[in-house]
Image: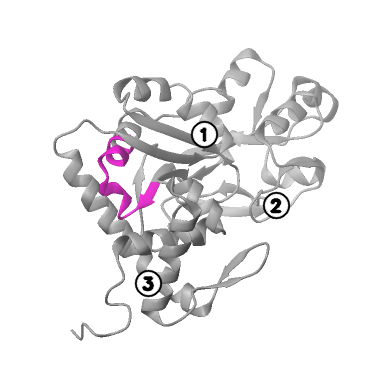
Amino acid sequence: MDLEMKGAGASYNQIVIFHTIAKEGSIRGAARKLEMAAPSVSQSLKLLETKLGLPLFSRSTRQMSLTEAGKFLLENTTDAIASLDYALEGVHDLSHAPSGKVSMTVPRFVYQSVIRPIFPEFCKLYPDIELEISVSDTSVNIIKEGIDVGIRFGDRIEEGLVARKLTDPVKEALFVSPDYKQKNGIPEVPQDLEQHKLIQYRFGASNKLAPLFLNESGSTITVEMPLAMVVNDTDISIDAAKEGIGIGRFLAPLTEKHFKDGSLIPVLEDYWHEIPGLYVYFSQNSQKARRTRVLIDFLIEKAKLNEI
């Protein structure tokens, strides 16, 4: 290797500081994040740019944005920095209890039904780990956002991620209130849904309406039906169904208690569509950190869909 090449003298600390500036968007923000003096952060960036012979940021009075060189450096050092961080942490973990920060993003109903009953046990088992739980119903890019672990349906994941199964597949239930049944009757076959109205769900991330799938004679069919209202929150769907607004939809295990107490009545049960189970997903690098591994293992052992 030609050690005289530009950038050969760039240090690990300079690259880390560069990454932090890129993420925080300013010298001062990076200084706060790194707990360093702003002039020291600025000097580190200047030294790195001098070694590379190119500016890494375009500067204005209000913000800093990456140049093409900056984007290239960020994209091509992210994995390497992460690998080195996890390697250093792995050595530390050999003689210490799991410690440090570990973050997780989950949809709200997953927090309510899966995480809420079990996270206190995790915190007590690992008092030196600082657990951060972020609740979001939108699709989160955990690598871009710097989050360690996410939970969602299905094992379809982006490149660089790993998925592990948490729960078995579940069925999506359809249901009405006793008042709705008395006034409108209930559908007996999928074709009857044309005479009813659906309380529809809209995805927060894509802003698209959730297609209604049913299982008929072993095949999956898509059903179009009139809408009573559109929501982006499952609690509203339950509330609206209880008020007789229309036919509601939600995961069968999480509506079971409403069926038992009679506040909701299942309809078209033989046609309910099966949805892949919940999976925990994480980057290939992050699992090397012991604090992340113990969280993943804990979730795999303890996670189940509980009634909300």
Image x and y of residue 255, in percent? 59, 26
Q: CA distance from mark 1 to mark 3?
A: 34 Å
| Residue in the picture at 68% in, 22% down | 264
Please, which residue is most extreme toward the left here? 95
Residue at the disc numbered 2: 209
Residue at the disc numbered 3: 76
Image quadrant holding the N terminus, namely: bottom left
Q: Residues within 10 Å of mark 1 (few under 14, many from 20)?
A: many
Instruction: Examine the image and state in which quarter residue 238 appears.
Output: top right
Kindly state the secondary structure of the residue where label 2 is placed: loop
Kindly state the secondary structure of the residue where label 1 is placed: helix
Amino acid identity at mark 2: Leu
Q: Which residues are magenta?
A: 281-296
Residue at the disc numbered 1: 110
| Residue in the picture at 83% in, 30% down | 184
The rendered magenta stretch, by its main secondary structure, is classed as: helix
Image x and y of residue 202, in percent? 70, 47
* Among the two numbered marks 1 and 3 on one chain, the one whose residue lies closer to the N terminus: 3
Which one is in front, 167 or 7? 7
